């Protein structure tokens, strides 16, 4: 009996072992990293939902992953920031409240952060199971393991699979919902309908991008209607195309009703986002009225739903916020800047951040399928029908991505990768029937594993050789494609070993707190600075640590080429440097200076001076090789007094000479 049962046990045990390695690698990697920017927001908001019954923090993201990630915090119940008299609570500024929660309430956030990351890791493991099962059904067990191996060792999924954000959760539900809907259209039973409806409902609270499931479901319904096989739904048999489409439409409406129920349940069946028993809040982070003016017809529809209390206020506001903020957003690609994005952004991110092994596997899979179709053209229609939900998911999601203005991260095309993993299962049959096929699959899986090993634990910073590898990633992409604030622990270790007693200067992109990691540095402009306004800092020789996003100036008002107008403004402000420093550091002198110039004007002048000076410095540093790259996301420079003077204090001619000399000296 054991001999007969052993093969049945071997497959799930092997799948579990592969996924265990995937999960262990991902957890180990993030245990060496600081909190990423969005994790602060997700965990703070999720805990507020559980702890306060208030839903206005970070409503633009899915409530499911935020609640899910915050379950350990809800059990432990760490102290939340003081709400009474807190101006940031009043205006729903989750960045600042998150900083207070993580760093100012007396508890150590990191254990709860790691617990939240492990919770999200369950969705990554679930995605791996779906990839294996789907591929196995199409291409057999060997094909399933080829797909699973490529998934498990993919740097992108090792990076995002355990971050406490919504990206992995939504990736799982896109794949699960498309599969469940397609299955429902073929089996038609009550169990299949319930699974599909619940999966769709959960997708709607996973992320607002779940709206893309609607056109996917519509396309799949028409594909199903074109199939001559009768459609059995609700105990009735439909044989005409019109009847099948109508039945699918009725089922979809019922899906919508279930989704509405799921959405209401996640908000405690409460319409109001603001808990009236808490200290009062003025508005969401951006008042409704601000959003109304920028989202047109979609905004009017959402407002109508809000007036009718059709769905919870926080869910509707989050939907409107996503629409409004996605129209204009600062972005960076291959040294260029834009606020409305590029059609080429996601193709570039895909080309640069997909492993060469997966690219090759996708190409080989396509060639094998083309060869099959050339030999037997009659199979084309049947084959496409078998993979229709995957093709629809991939095509609809990419069509939307190409037109999106939200070009801030490779993670936004994460839901399309499982389709590639599953499609690579085609190679499983080649592996089973051909010696060259076995060799090719072994090479591809080995290459995928080697790529993961080479970049570990810096999976988020992975770039393939086409882009010059991770060391050159900052020349192509920044923000969450490379630099999400994750490398403060690595910077601390480098400084301990190499900085000595020289001054340290830092400009950091993220919501982590350098002081928490023992990094006590003079603060240059933080590009997304939230509430900390650094005092005037005099630049001198020392160690300069700059996040890649800060170095590229994506979110600065001073980006792109340095202009003569900026140079003139900077030189005028330089004349005020003694006064700016005195205003920042000498209380008595500050009072004297404020007799003629208001505090707001002094702060504006200080901020503008710092931004221009920092931009001038970064123009030089972008052509200078760093002494070190911490996790590839933080660039460290050891600058001499001569360099600092030429880059920030001298005239334009001296600055230009420094840059030209540095460029010529590069190997």
Image: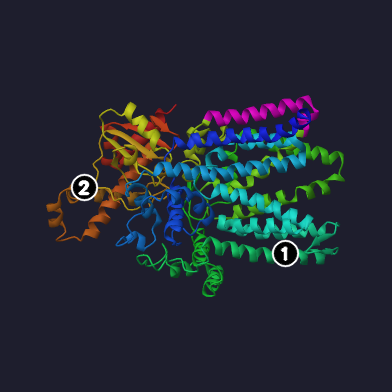
Residue 187 appears in the picture as rendered = yes
Mark 2 burial class by Cα count in 10 Å: few <14, some 14-19, many 20+: some
Tell us which disc is closer to us: 1 or 2: 1
Report which residue position mark 1 lands on: 251
Q: Which residue is located at x 85 percent, y 56 percent?
A: 229
Residue 529 appears in the picture as rendered = no
| Residue 78 location (% of width, % of height) | 38, 50
Name the magenta segment's main secondary structure. Answer: helix
Q: Which residues are magenta?
A: 429-454
Q: In terms of depth relative to the viewer, which is nearer, 84 or 431? A: 84
Question: Does 453 appear in magenta?
Answer: yes
Q: CA distance from mark 1 to mark 2?
A: 69 Å
Q: In terms of depth relative to the viewer, which is nearer, 616 or 259? A: 259
Question: Does 107 appear in magenta?
Answer: no
Q: Quadrant of the C terminus?
A: top left
109 with respect to 384 (left or right) = left
Report which residue position mark 2 lands on: 577
Q: Quadrant of the N terminus?
A: top right
**Vertical comparison of 534 with 545: above or below:** below
356 with respect to 24 (left or right) = right
Q: Which residue is located at x 70 percent, y 53 percent?
A: 180
| Residue 451 location (% of width, % of height) | 57, 30
Q: Which mark is residue 485?
A: none
């Amino acid at each position: 009996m054991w001999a007969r049962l052993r093969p049945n046990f071997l497959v799930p045990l092997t799948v579990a072992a592969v996924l265990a390695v995937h999960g262990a690698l991902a957890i180990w990697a993030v245990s060496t990293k600081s909190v990423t920017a969005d994790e602060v927001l997700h965990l703070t908001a999720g805990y507020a939902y559980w702890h306060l019954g208030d839903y206005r923090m970070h409503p633009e993201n899915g409530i499911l992953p935020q609640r899910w990630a915050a379950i350990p915090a809800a059990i432990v119940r760490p102290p939340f920031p003081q709400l009474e008299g807190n101006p940031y609570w009043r205006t729903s500024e989750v960045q600042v409240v998150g900083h207070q929660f993580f760093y100012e309430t007396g508890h150590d956030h990191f254990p709860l952060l790691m617990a939240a990351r492990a919770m999200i890791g369950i969705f990554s493991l679930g995605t791996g199971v779906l990839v294996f099962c789907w591929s196995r059904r199409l291409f057999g067990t060997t094909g399933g393991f080829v797909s699973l191996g490529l998934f498990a060792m993919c740097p992108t999924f090792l990076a995002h699979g355990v971050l406490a954000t919504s990206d992995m959760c939504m990736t799982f539900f896109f794949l699960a919902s498309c599969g469940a809907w397609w299955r429902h259209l073929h089996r038609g039973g009550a169990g299949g309908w319930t699974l599909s409806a619940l999966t769709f409902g959960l997708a709607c609270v996973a992320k607002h991008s779940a709206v893309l499931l609607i056109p996917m479901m519509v396309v799949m319904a028409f594909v199903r209607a074109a199939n001559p096989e009768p459609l059995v739904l609700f105990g009735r048999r439909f044989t005409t195309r019109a009847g099948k489409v109508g039945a699918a439409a009725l089922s979809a409406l019922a899906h919508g009703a279930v989704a509405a129920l799921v959405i209401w349940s996640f908000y405690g069946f409460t319409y109001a986002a603001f808990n009236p028993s808490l200290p009062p809040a003025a508005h969401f982070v951006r008042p409704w009225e601000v959003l109304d003016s920028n989202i047109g017809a979609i905004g009017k529809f959402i407002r109508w739903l809000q007036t009718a209390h059709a769905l919870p206020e926080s869910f509707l506001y989050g939907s409107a916020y996503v629409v409004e903020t996605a129209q204009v957003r600062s972005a960076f690609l291959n040294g260029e800047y834009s606020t409305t994005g590029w059609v080429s952004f996601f193709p570039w991110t895909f080309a640069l951040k997909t492993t060469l092994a997966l690219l090759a596997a996708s190409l080989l899979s396509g060639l094998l399928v083309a060869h099959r179709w050339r030999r037997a053209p009659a199979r084309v229609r049947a084959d496409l029908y078998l993979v229709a939900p995957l093709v629809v998911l991939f095509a609809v999601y990419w069509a939307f991505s190409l037109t999106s203005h939200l070009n801030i991260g490779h993670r936004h095309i994460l839901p399309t990768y499982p389709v590639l993993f599953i499609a690579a299962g085609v190679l499983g049959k080649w592996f089973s029937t051909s010696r060259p096929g076995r060799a090719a699959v072994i090479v591809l899986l080995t290459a995928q594993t080697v790529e993961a090993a080479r970049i570990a634990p810096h999976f988020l910073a992975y770039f393939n050789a086409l882009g010059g590898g991770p060391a050159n990633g900052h020349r192509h992409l920044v923000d969450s494609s490379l630099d999400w604030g994750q490398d403060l622990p690595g910077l601390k270790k480098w400084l301990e070993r190499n900085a000595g007693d020289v001054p340290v200067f830092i400009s950091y992109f993220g919501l982590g707190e350098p002081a928490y990691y023992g990094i006590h540095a003079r603060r240059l402009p933080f590009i997304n600075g939230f509430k900390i306004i650094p005092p005037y800092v005099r630049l001198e020789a020392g160690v300069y640590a700059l996040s890649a996003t800060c170095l590229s100036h994506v979110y600065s008002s001073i980006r792109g080429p340095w202009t003569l107008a900026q140079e003139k403004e900077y030189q005028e402000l330089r004349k005020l440097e003694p006064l700016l420093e005195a205003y920042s550091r000498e209380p008595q002198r500050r009072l004297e200076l404020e007799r003629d110039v208001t505090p707001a004007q002094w702060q504006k002048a200080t901020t503008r001076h710092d931004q221009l000076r920092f931009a001038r410095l970064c123009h030089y540093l972008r052509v200078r090789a760093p002494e070190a790259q911490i996790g590839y996301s933080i660039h460290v420079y050891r600058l001499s007094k001569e360099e600092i003077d030429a880059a920030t204090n001298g005239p334009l001619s001296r600055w230009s000479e420094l840059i030209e000399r540095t460029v010529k000296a590069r190997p």
